[in-house]
């Protein structure tokens, strides 16, 4: 007969046995490559010749590499704009669909807004490259029709990153839209009724009821959205190959160029580690700040 202590040990061993495949997968395909990249950042290596110890020279060079600094700034700006845009539009669309009386129309709008998310980034970018074309794009066609004039969406250093933000956000708004639909569905009806009794309407109702009640959803959407956005590659690469100049070049694009085109795997690993650190700091900062504005029931 097993005693309680022996039974606990058996359960613990079974637990480790069940999680072992997942843990091995994480170690082999996530933690392992991260550790290898970190070690590789201290070496010169082009695959064709033996590794040479570089010390901190790669990290020192990043500060002096104008392209690397530009890509980090582009990436951070891109991620912040995407998170802001996705939250505002996703919240607004979810609010609008929530108020649609006919359930079949609600199902229709849910499908339409979510559809771009299941498409590949490359497909969306190829389509949008024609959409925003300076000479025959449909956007400039309608801008000219109302007298605004053409905008060099993909060839101006001042506009191209904004264009990429719009393309990326258009594809991924469906994710935040679904999140906010779920957040609105979890709001107790008595809270809405109490707001109506107190006379809250319009913007005051949104500001004092809906936003606080879905603040956990806003927080989750911001964290996940930022992590995904800083890793963007396909949209700027397909749209303009990072140009004009370095105005649309992101850090992941620069990592790809240095590591797989120039075969500077050590320097590419250094850039990847620094991007990982930025994601880590940004996520930790968001978790720290959320204590002051996220309200949990």
Image (spheres, helix red, strand yellow):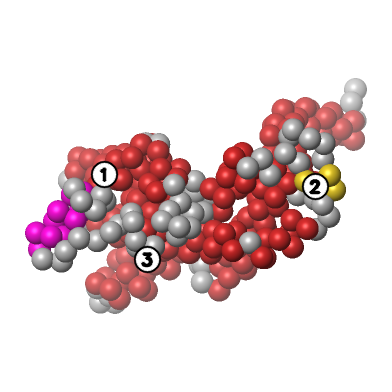
Position of 106 with respect to 285 (left or right) is left
Mark 1 and mark 2 residues within 8 Å of each other at the beta carbon: no
- SS of the residue under disc 3: loop
| Residue 139 as seen in the image, left or right of residue 13 | left
Q: Nearer the viewer, residue 183 or 179?
A: 179
The residue that label 2 is drawn on is 43
Report x, y in % for residue 81.
Answer: 42, 63
Marks 3 and 1 sit apart, C-alpha to C-alpha, by 19 Å
Q: Where's residue 88, x and y in %? A: 35, 62
Q: Tell whether position 139 is magenta.
A: yes
Q: Is residue 274 above or below residue 25?
A: below
Of residues 94 and 116, the one drawn nearer to the viewer in this rendering: 116
Residue 202 seen by the camera: yes
Task: Say which residue label 1 marks.
Answer: 130
Write down the quadrant of residue 244 in the picture.
Answer: bottom left
Disc 3: which residue: 158
Q: Nearer the viewer, residue 37 or 118?
A: 37
Q: Residues within 10 Å of mark 2 (few under 14, many from 20)?
A: many
Q: Is residue 120 above or below residue 102?
A: above
Residue in the picture at 57% in, 59% down = 67
């Amino acid at each position: 007969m097993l005693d309680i202590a022996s039974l606990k040990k058996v359960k613990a061993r079974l637990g480790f046995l069940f999680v072992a495949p997942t843990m091995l997968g994480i170690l082999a395909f996530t933690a392992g490559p991260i550790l290898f990249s970190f070690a590789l950042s201290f070496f010169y290596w082009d695959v064709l010749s033996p590794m040479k110890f570089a010390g901190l020279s790669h990290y020192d060079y990043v500060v002096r590499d104008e392209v690397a600094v530009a890509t980090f700034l582009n990436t951070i700006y891109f991620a912040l704009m995407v998170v802001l845009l996705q939250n505002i539009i996703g919240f607004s669309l979810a609010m609008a669909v929530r108020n649609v009386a006919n359930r079949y129309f609600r199902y229709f709008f849910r499908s339409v807004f979510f559809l771009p998310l299941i498409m590949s980034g490359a497909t969306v970018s190829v389509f949008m490259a024609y959409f925003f074309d300076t000479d025959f794009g449909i956007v400039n066609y309608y801008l000219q029709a109302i007298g605004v004039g053409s905008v060099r969406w993909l060839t101006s250093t001042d506009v191209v990153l904004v264009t990429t933000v719009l393309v990326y956000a258009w594809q991924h708004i469906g994710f935040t839209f679904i999140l906010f639909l779920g957040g609105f569905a979890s709001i107790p009806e008595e809270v809405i009724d109490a707001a109506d009794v107190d006379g809250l309407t319009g913007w005051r109702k949104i500001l004092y009821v809906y936003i606080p009640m879905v603040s956990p959803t806003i927080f989750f959407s911001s964290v996940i959205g930022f992590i995904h956005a800083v890793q963007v590659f396909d949209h700027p690469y397909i749209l303009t190959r990072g140009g004009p100049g370095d105005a649309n070049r992101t850090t992941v694009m620069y990592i790809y160029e240095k590591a797989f085109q120039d075969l500077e795997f050590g320097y590419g690993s250094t850039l990847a580690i620094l991007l990982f650190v930025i994601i880590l700091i940004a996520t930790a900062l968001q978790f720290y700040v959320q204590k002051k504005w996220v309200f949990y029931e």
